[in-house]
């Protein structure tokens, strides 16, 4: 079974905090915060640098994410996982984030590292 590792530097962000509402013609649209968009851009650069960009993995996997946050503030692990999965799809590391690929997230957790915030992602084929 193959194991893929990816480390994304920077303080992990969620999509749900500080969303923006913008007008698109006659409609209103909800967009993620500027901080999240910056984090997503950083995710793409780091995944390209580490050779994971456009791998489009499509086998059933356990995707373990260990988040190292800059502060000890409370954060919702599920929201962090949702943002990470969306970034993995956007950077084409995985083909999709449905349960046929992202089968489990066993071992995912949140820790503290003031000096080097990051997320360490380990994707193991099941």
Image (spheres, rainbow, N blue to C red):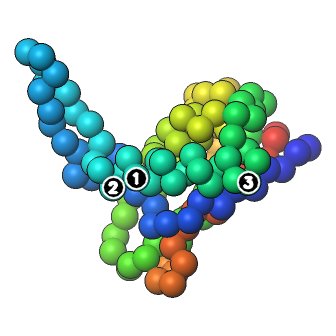
Furthest toward the top, the residue is 26
Residue on which disc 3 sits = 50
Q: Which numbered marker is on residue 113?
A: none
Q: Is residue 20 above or below residue 36?
A: above
Q: Earlier in the sequence, mark 3 or mark 2?
A: 2
Q: Is residue 68 visible?
A: yes
Q: Are marks 2 and 1 in contact (CB under 8 Å)?
A: yes
Q: How many marks?
A: 3
- Which image quarter: residue 7? bottom right
Residue on which the image places disc 2? 35
Residue visible at 43% across and 76% down?
Answer: 70
Q: Residue at x 29, y 50 (%)?
A: 34
Q: Along the line of sight, which residue is nearer the eye, 2 or 77? A: 2
Residue 41 image offset from top left, x and y in percent: 48, 48
Q: Is residue 68 left or right of residue 39?
A: right
Other-residue count near label 2 (Cα within 10 Å), few / some / many at <14 / 14–19 / ≥20: some
Classed neighbour count for the residue bearing mark 1: other residues with Cα under 10 Å, few (<14), some (14–19), many (≥20): few
**How dense is the environment of label 3, judged by Cα within 10 Å: few (below 14), some, or many (20 and up)?**
few
Front residue of 7 and 64: 7
Label 1: element kind: helix
| SS at badge 3 | loop
Disc with the residue nearer the chain's start (3 vs 1): 1
Q: Residue furthest left?
A: 26
Disc number placed over residue 38 in the picture, else none: 1
Q: Position of residue 53 (x, y in %)?
A: 69, 40
């Amino acid at each position: 079974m193959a194991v893929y590792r990816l480390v994304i530097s920077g303080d992990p962000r969620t999509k749900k905090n500080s969303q923006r509402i913008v007008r698109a013609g006659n409609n209103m649209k909800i967009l993620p915060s500027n901080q999240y968009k910056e984090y997503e851009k950083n995710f793409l650069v780091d995944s390209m640098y580490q050779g994971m960009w456009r791998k489009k993995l499509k086998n059933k996997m356990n995707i373990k994410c260990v988040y190292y946050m800059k502060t000890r503030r409370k954060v919702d692990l599920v929201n962090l996982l949702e943002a990470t999965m969306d970034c993995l799809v956007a950077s084409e590391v995985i083909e999709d984030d449905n349960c046929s690929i992202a089968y489990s997230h066993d071992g995912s957790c949140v820790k503290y590292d003031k000096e080097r915030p990051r997320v360490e992602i380990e994707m193991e084929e099941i």
